Image (spheres, grey):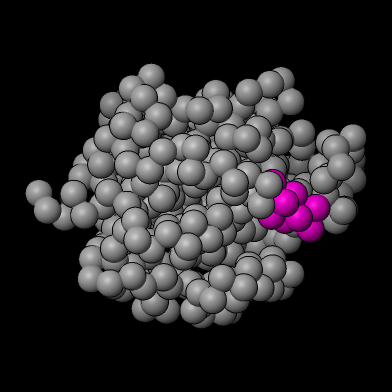
Amino acid sequence: MINQDQFAYLLPQLIHHRRYLHIHPEVGFYLPNTHDFVASILGQLKIPFVPHVGKYSLVGTIENGVGPVIGLRADMDALPMEEANKNIPYCSQKPGMMHACGHDAHTAILLSVADYLVHHKNQWKGTVQLIFQEAEEGPEPGGAEGIVKSGLVDNVDCFFGLHCGPQYPANTFAIKDLGAMASADTIRIKLIGKGAHAAYPHLGVDPIVMQAELILAIQSIPTRMIDPTEPCVITIAQVHSGSTHNIIPESAFLEGTVRAFNQDVRKKIEKSLEIAIKSVTLRHGGSYEYQYVYGYDALINQPQPTNYLKKIIKTVFGNEALTELSKPSMGAEDFSKYINHRTGCMVWLGTGSTPETKFGLHHPRFDVDEAALINGVSLFVNLVHEYHTIEEK
């Protein structure tokens, strides 16, 4: 194992890279400045890379003799929201954009991992694929799909990723065996009625009444139609209809998300939703348009790489540094695309040390304990350093 002290010199670099990215956030699939920033550093390190994978993702390759091929992923995109941390010197300078999910930290960590691995080739063997990914936050299908479809990671034996966890103290990690994060699908429903004067509802078909009935009917699907031991969530998050107080509108629109871990559950929910929509609209004499869009698959951490990561964490940081989670998250991550392509594991990196760094993901005051980023570098480098032990078993 490589001692923590050997990574201390990277902290100023980590902070610089993270803050630069935090000041200059970009969203979704449009990351030109972020792409060029990462490309410039990989170029300085003389690491070969493929630019513009998908749109603005990059895949770098460090080859160092015969050995395993390990894929390390960092997502780079920010969120379309306004930052509330106006008092910090590295506050976002782009209105309506903010790194509120730690992707700036993920990218900075992977850049420093690349720096260390290039300059310490005597400490490891094999190949590391450095995956800098766009659009983890969407829009669908997310940035992982383009990277996997490119064929550039077909030779990877195992993928690893980490994610900032403000709910966990710095100097700790958290892992969930098997089902770690849910699938995320989108539902879009248009209820079509017949417009009328609000004083004469009998002359129309009211889509707002259909909308109200349907929202309540939908909630009986996870509670009465799905095995209660199977985690799932259906949330209607957008409701739009009408234009004024005295007109029954022609239509109403609903949009929401479905979260689950079991593929059969996803399919049953898709079918059950249409049955509910059809029942409500038929009873009222209306019609409908329905879309069920399959999004990110559930993130299922695989046993061998998960157990390997636990071993690395306990050995490098101590047994007390590892939290083994008993419950999954209903959040979603397109890192599942890499695991499904080969195998892999994602781990939470503790970044919450003070009240300022304990705000949750996607909060406008989200921030990280930057000293904790060294732990991410140490974890990635050590798993590369020791991976031959898993190959030899």
Query: In the displayed structure, does residue 361 sit left or right of residue 265?
Result: right
Q: Position of residue 93 (x, y in %)?
A: 87, 53
Query: In the displayed structure, does residue 160 sit left or right of residue 138?
Result: left
Front position in the image: 69 or 153 = 69
Q: Is residue 392 magenta?
A: no
What's the magenta bit mostly, secondary-structure-wise?
A: helix
Q: Position of residue 362 (x, y in %)?
A: 67, 39
Residue at 77 percent across and 37 percent down: it is 364
* Residue 72 visible, this orientation: yes
Front position in the image: 178 or 46 = 46
Residue at 34 percent across and 48 percent down: it is 383
Q: 158 above or below 330?
A: below
- State the count of labels: 0
Front position in the image: 205 or 150 = 150
Residue at 36 percent across and 78 percent down: it is 151
Tell me where the magenta segment starts and ends, as one range: 15-24
Q: 50 above or below 253?
A: below
Residue at 12 percent across and 53 percent down: it is 392
Front position in the image: 221 or 319 = 319
Q: Position of residue 386 (x, y in %)?
A: 27, 49
